[in-house]
Amino acid sequence: MKVLGIETSCDETAAAVVEDGSRILSNQIASQVEIHARYGGIVPEVASRQHTLSIMPIIERAMAEASATWDDLDGVAVTIGPGLAGSLLIGVNTAKAISLARGLPITGVNHLEGHIYANWLAEGSLDFPLVCLIVSGGHSDLVLVRGYRRYVLLGQTRDDAAGEAFDKASRLLGLGYPGGPAIERAASSGTASIPLPRAWLKGTNDFSFSGVKTALLRLVEGDGISSQEDAAASFQEAVVDVLVTKTVAAAREHGVRQILLGGGVAANERLRQSLMESSPIPVLIPEPILCTDNAAMIAACGYFRFEAGETDGLDLDVIPNLRIA
Ligand code: KG4
Ligand code: ZN
């Protein structure tokens, strides 16, 4: 079964064709990073306008890369949330138009579930029950996955999401946007020598990153920072330390067999390495291009929805504040 995936929840316009939920035939992404970098963050109005310009060329490129015709497709999967309403609408309306014009079934996909399904595209197989840490620009969710589409939300952020914390720290240090890759780049030539606080929130699986961000702000506003690289490395270490320690603890508490990672922050090499070193059980992490927003993960998730008979009608709508469970 070949599924066309469409993703426009935030600032990437993406389309992909995936076969049987696991074989990527094409994966096209048009990033708006350079456009939003001018403003130091995503401007929702600009994002939706850009999606309208990019969506058809990106779909055509994905179809061409997969050497697929419309007749080769078996369904269309599209992100319905969470995300920016205006951005999500472009993807959903395009998917509906294709569904109507080509007589293809359509299914709406939860973007966060997509980040979990990116692991279906990774090397290696899944072993339930497992714990998945989804760390993106808007979420830090720790999810117990008991089986296909059986989720329990174990913990979430109480303030900033992990990616949001990276973005804000980068702005504080004058390292630019998007913050995650900028912090990682600077950190690679620094040492984590500055002590920064960790919010352990003992007895819960929740996260909090506002304290470490404020501590960094105090440093910048106070005596100043002698090395941006050391500050970036210290910040990265503080965030990674909490994410890894709490994920491994939750995995132990629930006696799971595997840990998965997903979301844009999962592209961070220090996080990937640290989790693999600290975990007593196998860890599965998609390659970086499948961690940040993409449509292959949406097509993979869509395949399993179609297999379960979960198709939607043309009244499919966006749900900007959709949750995982
Ligand atoms: O999943 P994603 O691409 O979009 C959302 O669904 O939000 O995640 C974007 C977030 C941004 O906050 C970005 O700074 C962060 O992921 N990110 C990283 C890295 N690459 C992207 N954070 C840390 N290290 C990275 N290498
Ligand atoms: Zn995402």
Image: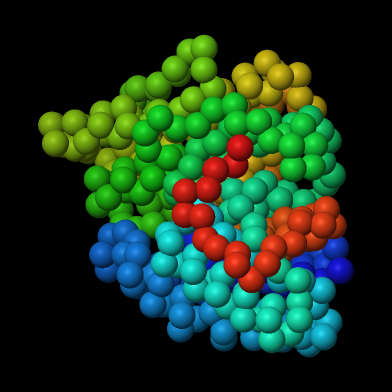
Whether residue 277 is visible = no
Q: Position of residue 192 (x, y in %)?
A: 40, 32
Residue 205 in picture, x, y percent from top left: 54, 22
Percent of width and height locating residue 251: 68, 23
Q: Is residue 40 left or right of residue 114?
A: left
All told, the count of numbered labels is: 0
- Counting from the top left corner in percent of width and height, residue 3 is at 77, 70
Query: In percent of the image, x 49 and y 69: which residue is there?
Result: 89
Residue at 39% from the left image edge and 70% from the top image edge = 47
Q: Is residue 112 above or below residue 34?
A: above
Depth check: give the residue in front, 263 or 83.
83
Q: Compared with residue 236, is residue 266 higher up or lower down, i.e. above or below? A: below
Query: Which of 14 and 266 lies nearest the eye of the viewer?
Result: 14
Q: Residue at x 61, y 37 (%)?
A: 325
In the displayed structure, 2 sits above or below 147; it is: below
The image's colouring method is rainbow
Nearer to us in this view, 143 or 71: 71
Query: Picture quarter containing residue 290?
Result: bottom right
Residue 314 in view: yes
Q: Residue at x 50, y 38 (%)?
A: 140
Using the image, determine if residue 130 lies above or below residue 184: above
Left or right relative to 130: residue 155 = left
> Which quadrant of the structure image shows residue 219?
top left
Question: Split into 4 quadrants, where in the image is the N terminus?
Answer: bottom right
* Along the line of sight, the residue nearer the viewer: 313 or 112: 313
